Amino acid sequence: MISLDEQFIKTELEIEKMQAAGHVNALALEEIKKLIKPGVSTRDLDRTAETIIRDHGGIPTFKGYPGPYPYPATLTISINEEMVHGIPSGRELMEGDIVSVDCGTTLDGYIGDSAFTQGVGEIGEEGSRLIRVTRESLYKGIEQILPGKHLGDVSAAIQEHVENFGYHVPRQYTGHGVGRQMHEPPQVPNFGIPGQGLVLKKGMTIAIEPMVLVGTHKTRVLSDEWTVISADHSLTAHYEHSVAVTANGPLILTKVKEN
């Protein structure tokens, strides 16, 4: 009998297809980074990302995703205390905001999923440090993605780095497996114990996504039924890459591929 984790091990060809999807996803997000300025609406950013994805033969993975109601956009754009799943709208970015952008692209049946956080113009010292620590924690987790390591090693590396700076990780929102579906097993928490949990195997593909809050690990969902905010309205940040476990170490799938 094939175990649950073995069902989601990818072949080299499947990983190449995920890289292709991740490349398109990265192209869209790199363009969005250039456009994040005061006065730009989140809806305009969303339209730009959708155009880039479709122009490259992809499909926006998030659009229509099941939830309290089908998700209505290509991106999730979460501002300041909004941690994840913010819905693009006519809201305009303001100087000093920090903005988390998450995007998924489906290409040839496979998915690339990644996210970043960026300041709008000049931001305060707390926001700058939060963004830096969150990004660093992503790569601390990625460093642990090796055959024979445990998921707990990945989770603990993220948690330790975040908490060393006095920040917090949420308990009910996690990273996840990714491939033909956006959310496949296993769940990848941003907290854990080294040496515990699923043993990583070559061919596994997972989305590592630290979400970090300044004041508390507690969150709540707004009345739009999608947007998740920090319970105390403190600042938040979010980074994500889709990553494959290989014999040579972690392979980040959601980067722009060089020709």
Image (spheres, helix red, strand yellow):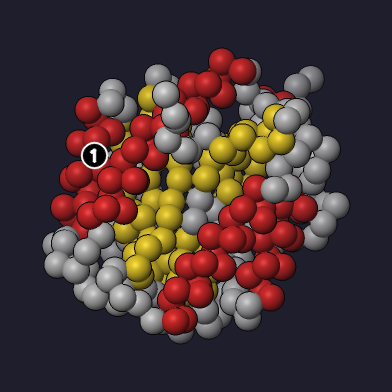
Residue in the image at 45% along x and 74% along y: 128
Answer few, some or many: residues within 10 Å of disc 1's Cα (few below 14, many 20 plus, some between 14 and 19): many
Observer able to see residue 121: yes
Q: How many marks?
A: 1
- To which quarter of the image does residue 22 belong? top left
Residue 62 vs residue 129: left or right?
left
Helix, strand or loop under label 1: helix
Question: Which residue of the protein is positioned furthest toward the right in this rendering?
Answer: 195
Q: Is residue 4 above or below residue 207?
A: above
Residue in the image at 27% along x and 53% along y: 34
Q: Is residue 85 above or below residue 202?
A: below
Q: Position of residue 185 (x, y in %)?
A: 62, 39
Q: Nearer the viewer, residue 178 or 31?
A: 31
Q: Is residue 156 above or below residue 124?
A: above
Q: Position of residue 5 (x, y in %)?
A: 71, 32
Residue 54 vs residue 200: left or right?
left
Q: Tell me the kind of residue under disc 1.
A: Glu
Quarter holding the N terminus is top right
Residue in the image at 56% along x and 44% along y: 207
Q: Position of residue 81 (x, y in %)?
A: 39, 75
- To which quarter of the image does residue 27 belong? top left
Q: Nearer the viewer, residue 111 or 256?
A: 256
Quarter holding the C terminus is top left
Residue 162 vs residue 201: left or right?
left
Residue in the image at 85% along x and 52% along y: 195
Q: Is residue 102 above or below residue 118?
A: above
- To which quarter of the image does residue 162 belong? bottom right
State the residue position of label 1: 50
